[in-house]
Each structure stands twice: as structure tokens, then as C-alpha cells.
């Protein structure tokens, strides 16, 4: 290798070194903020650790077995129902609104978009407090309105048969805007030539939706559904603010179950085990999402 070749390669090596130096602070921060707590929580999931007694002996898989034999099946079923109901209703409403907003000569489109984006700009805590007041059994406007129709007042968050449905309603009101934004962006990015060709050939609106729009939108739809499903599986803030997992355990999700084990029963080992199980499920769904995005 000649001296000229070494000199020519030096700027490239310096450039690579500079890239690593600039990236290093972000990697260090992520390692301290994300990786270290994650590894420590995995370690705790294999330990007997109750806050009032301190760190105990190595428990192996005892925490996982205790969690799976306790209420985990029930909270998993509640989480699955909440996730499916929220995602299905949000998708149907969001896709319908996105199709309406995508009409070529719709007047006031910008105004409608601004109004429909308001819910997603609100924090979950503010949304929960607002709906707690609206669904209050004594003072809420919802019971007042249905009272005008001759329907007796309902305990929306206190009745086991109504609590989960009410939480789903609140979540749909809050999160539909996000799915609407993603689906509307997909419709706007979709090429217009296939739709125009189908319209010239005499296809009806329903046929265009079924045979043109839906196949072209399928990648966007899959990604949108997967992102929303991952977020719904981790649902905690609305549950905490609206029902605290009640009445009884009618609305207790996996995330709230982990909170209850760790901060009410003070069993950090079992709480870490629940959190790690949820992490595995979310990670698998994320891998499916990444594969779907890569394939489409």
C-alpha cells in the first residue's frame, strides 16, 4: 500500500470516527434510560422482592408461575376484548371519515380536519377527567340527557356490565383521530390514475372501493392497525383515571395488573414478571409490524 493510498483513506476513517463520536451521546443516554432499567427489571422478575421485606432469594420462574396461575388469564381476556373493540370501532370510523374527507370537491375540508384532530391533541388524563364528569351518575350530562328520554340513570363506571363498554367509548373518542390522520395521509398519497381508469370503465363507488382503493391502501391499513393494537395492549392511563380496574376487576388490563402488584401489593418481582410478559407480546407484534412494512 502506497503513502498516497493511506493519505486518501485517512479522511474516510476520520469521517467514520466523527460519526461514531456524534452518535455516542445518544447511544449512552438510551443505554442509561432504556437498556439499564429494562435489564434490571428482567433481573427483578427472577427475584423474590417485596418492598416491605427487601430483596429475597433467587426465585427462578416462580414469579411467572405465580402470575400465570393467579388473575393473568382474566386480565389478558379483558385486555384482548378492550384492544379488539377499540381497534375495530376506531378503524371503521376513521376509514369512513377518511374516505369522506378525501372527496375531491368537499367544501370546508380544512375546518373538518381541524375539528377532528382536536381529540388526539388532548392528553389522556384530561380526556379521562372530562368523561368522568360527563358520566357522573348524579351530576353528569349523559344521565341528564337519557333522563329526558325516560331512561333511568346508569352507573357507567360502577356497573360491571357497562364499565368496559364505557371505557371503550372514551378510548374510541380519543384515539380515532390518530387512525384518521394515518389513513387520510395514505389516501392522499395513493395514485389517482387507477381510480380514474376504474371510473371511466363504469365502476361504481363500491366497486372502486373494493377493487382499487382497498388493495392500494392495504399496506397503510395493516401498519395503522398494528400500531394502534400495540398501543391498546399497553392501555393504562385511561383505566387508571376512569375505573382503577373496577368495578371488581371488570376493566383491569395487564398494565394495570402490573401496577396493582407492584404498588398496592408491593410485590416488585411479580410486577416485573407481568411487565416482561407484556414486553414479549408487544415485541412480537412490533416484529410483525416491521416485517409488514418491509414487505409492502
Image (cartoon, helix red, strand yellow):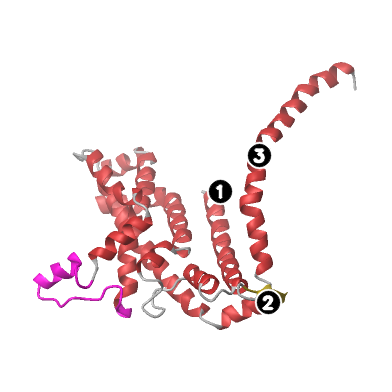
Distance, label 2 to label 3, CA atoms, is: 36 Å
Check the image and name the residue furthest to the top. Answer: 4
Task: Choose the circle earlier in sequence order: 3 or 1.
Answer: 3
Q: Secondary structure at mark 2?
A: loop
Q: Nearest the camera: 218 or 200?
A: 218
Check the image and name the residue furthest to the front. Answer: 52
Task: Choose the circle earlier in sequence order: 1 or 2.
Answer: 2
Mark identifier at residue 294? 1
Residue 95, x across and y down, in percent: 32, 53
Around disc 1, counting alpha carbons within 10 Å, would you say few (fewer than 14), some (14 to 19), or many (20 or more)?
few
Is residue 70 positioned above or below 202 on the image?
A: below
**Image quadrant occupied by the N terminus:** top right
Q: Nearest the camera: 6 or 251?
A: 251
Predominant secondary structure in magenta? loop
Q: Which residue is tagged 2? A: 61
Distance, label 1 to label 2, CA atoms, is: 36 Å
Around disc 2, counting alpha carbons within 10 Å, would you say few (fewer than 14), some (14 to 19), or many (20 or more)?
few
Check the image and name the residue furthest to the bottom. Answer: 69
- Asked if residue 43 lies left or right of residue 131, the reply is right
Magenta residues, as a range? 137-161
Mark identifier at residue 25? 3
**Which residue is at 60% across, 68% downward?**
272
Is residue 88 positioned above or below 156 on the image?
A: above
Residue 117, x across and y down, in percent: 31, 47
Amino acid at each position: 500500500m502506497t503513502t498516497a493510498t493511506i493519505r486518501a483513506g485517512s479522511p474516510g476513517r476520520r469521517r467514520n470516527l466523527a460519526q461514531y463520536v456524534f452518535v455516542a451521546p445518544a447511544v449512552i443516554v438510551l443505554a442509561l434510560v432504556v437498556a439499564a432499567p429494562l435489564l434490571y427489571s428482567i433481573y427483578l422478575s427472577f427475584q423474590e422482592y417485596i418492598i416491605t421485606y427487601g430483596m429475597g432469594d433467587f426465585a427462578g420462574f416462580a414469579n411467572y408461575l405465580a402470575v400465570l396461575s393467579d388473575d393473568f388469564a382474566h386480565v389478558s381476556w379483558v385486555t384482548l376484548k378492550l384492544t379488539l373493540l377499540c381497534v375495530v370501532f376506531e378503524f371503521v370510523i376513521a376509514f369512513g371519515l377518511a374516505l369522506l374527507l378525501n372527496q375531491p370537491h368537499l367544501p370546508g375540508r380544512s375546518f373538518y380536519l381541524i375539528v377532528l384532530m382536536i381529540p388526539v391533541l388532548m392528553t389522556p388524563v384530561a380526556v379521562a377527567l372530562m368523561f368522568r364528569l360527563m358520566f357522573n351518575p348524579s351530576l353528569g350530562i349523559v344521565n341528564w340527557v337519557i333522563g329526558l328520554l325516560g331512561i333511568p340513570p346508569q352507573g357507567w363506571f360502577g356497573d360491571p356490565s357497562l364499565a368496559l363498554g364505557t371505557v371503550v367509548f372514551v378510548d374510541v373518542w380519543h384515539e380515532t383521530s390518530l387512525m384518521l390522520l394515518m389513513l387520510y395521509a395514505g389516501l392522499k398519497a395513493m395514485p389517482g390514475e387507477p381510480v380514474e381508469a376504474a371510473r371511466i370503465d363504469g365502476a361504481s363507488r363500491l366497486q372502486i372501493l373494493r377493487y382499487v382503493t382497498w388493495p392500494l391502501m392495504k399496506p397503510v391499513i395493516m401498519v395503522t392497525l398494528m400500531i394502534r393494537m400495540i398501543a391498546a395492549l399497553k392501555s393504562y392511563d385511561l383505566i387508571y383515571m376512569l375505573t382503577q380496574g373496577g368495578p371488581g376487576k371488570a376493566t383491569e388490563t395487564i398494565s394495570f395488573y402490573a401496577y396493582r402488584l407492584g404498588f398496592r401489593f408491593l410485590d416488585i418481582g411479580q410486577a416485573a414478571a407481568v411487565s416482561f410478559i407484556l414486553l414479549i407480546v408487544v415485541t412480537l407484534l412490533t416484529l410483525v409490524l416491521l416485517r409488514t412494512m418491509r414487505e409492502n
